[in-house]
Amino acid sequence: MTSGTDILDAVVIGAGWAGLGVSHALTQRGLRHRVLERGRIGETWRTQRWDSFRINTPNSQTVMPGDTYVGPDPDGAMTSGEFVALLEDYVGRHGLPVETGTPVTDLVASDGLYRLALPHGPVWARNVVIASSNQNCPVRPPFSTLLPPEVQQIDASAYRNASGLDRGAVLVVGSAQSGGQIAEDLVQAGRTVFLATGRVGRLPRMYRGRHISVWLVLTGLMDVTRRELLQQGPIPGRALQGALHTISLQSLSAQGVVLLGRLTGVNDGRLSFSNDAEAHVRHADEGSARLRSQIDEYIARNGIDAPSAEPDPAEVIGALLPNPPIRSIDLAARGITTVIWCTGFRGDFGWVRVPNVLDEQGQPLYENWFAGVAGVYFAGLPFVISRRSGTILAIKEEAALLADDIQRRLDS
């Protein structure tokens, strides 16, 4: 280790919205730090989104700490390119110390400090904030390896557009945000699409004159804590939501998407599905109805002057389900040449070699944003504190709390 003057107060790993939000908070407190990014600012937004992708939060909420939205389209949805431009502008305006093309290949603890190995030499810091996301390694079910080799398999993060796929029908596995949006993108491009559904909620895009995300914040539903969510059972994934209009399983079926139940296995080129597609449609309907009722109650309780509810075409249309239900598919017979896995992600933290920071599966151990070791923090993880955690809606508060704790450690 070199002299004490070379020891940073903190290092932030990752230059996405979470890492940049933390950097802004550290800068406000005058703390010496660097933001290390393996690629470019907003790298995953550049390389892991499809061409027609739009951010689900409205423009009015897609803002970084210290900024406010002043544009003409508060309910609009940014493209990934527009969001990257927002992040780059944020770095420039606030003079954040971002170093791109600088991957961290090793993180270890030594004498109360942290040593980070970089391509051009090590960096030492008293605190480390890991903001590299736990959404960068696609997860597929184990039986994906049993699919015939001639079937093209890609993950949601690798999908760009229909023209980039092999000719033929497409099976999309997973009906949350990515699966539903990709299925619609494909069917609107003229592809034959099969969708293996799951038990996933649904959000209307607009309700009673406001974007649904605005209502979720106003009603406090985004502030339901992680503890409260766990008391109800395993934390569910994000609901199916359209960025420009409501997407539902039934609206997809009306466009020609063939709705299947949950994919349960692969055997000799045949795929098996459970008989629960109708139940999945009903589950999403019930969740959306329950949410709308909560918003109605909030409006009435607070005497808000809001327009009356109007039917959403995507929610009132009936589902077109195969009759009888499709329980098995021969890929070759159905002409399915591509399977797109929209089955979740995990983080790549193999470079972290500090004990008690990762679990046996190599994923973060944390309480709120604190790792199991003093001076190590995680930023931007979903459901860390509340339902809003893991979204840009959370970073202003979480970055400030994290930076305050770093300041306390340095002052003690």
Image (cartoon, rainbow, N blue to C red):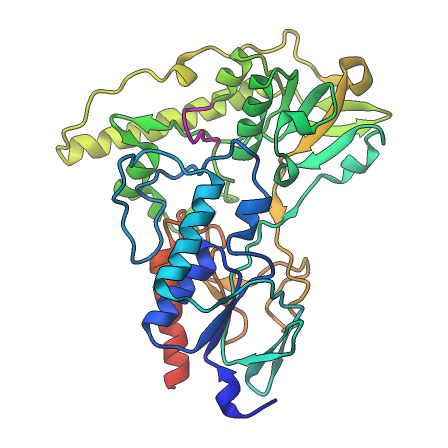
Residue 287's spot in the image, x, y percent?
42, 28
In depth, the one of 264 and 314 nearer the eye is 314
In depth, the one of 390 and 260 nearer the eye is 390
Q: Is residue 151 magenta?
A: no
Q: Residue at left 51%, top 56%?
A: 41
Q: Quadrant of the C terminus?
A: bottom left
Residue 108's spot in the image, x, y percent?
64, 76
Q: Residue at left 55%, top 83%?
A: 113
Picture layout, residue 411 above or below residue 160: below
* Helix, strand or loop: magenta stretch: loop
Q: Is residue 202 visible?
A: yes
Q: Residue at left 51%, top 40%?
A: 237
In the visual, does 264 lie left or right of 84? Answer: right
Residue 234's spot in the image, x, y percent?
52, 44
Residue 380's spot in the image, x, y percent?
47, 56
Q: Quadrant of residue 297?
A: top left
Residue extent of the magenta highlight: 240-247
Quick one: which residue is furthest to the bottom in this view?
3
Picture layout, residue 400 above or below residue 199: below
In the visual, does 330 lie left or right of 156? Answer: right
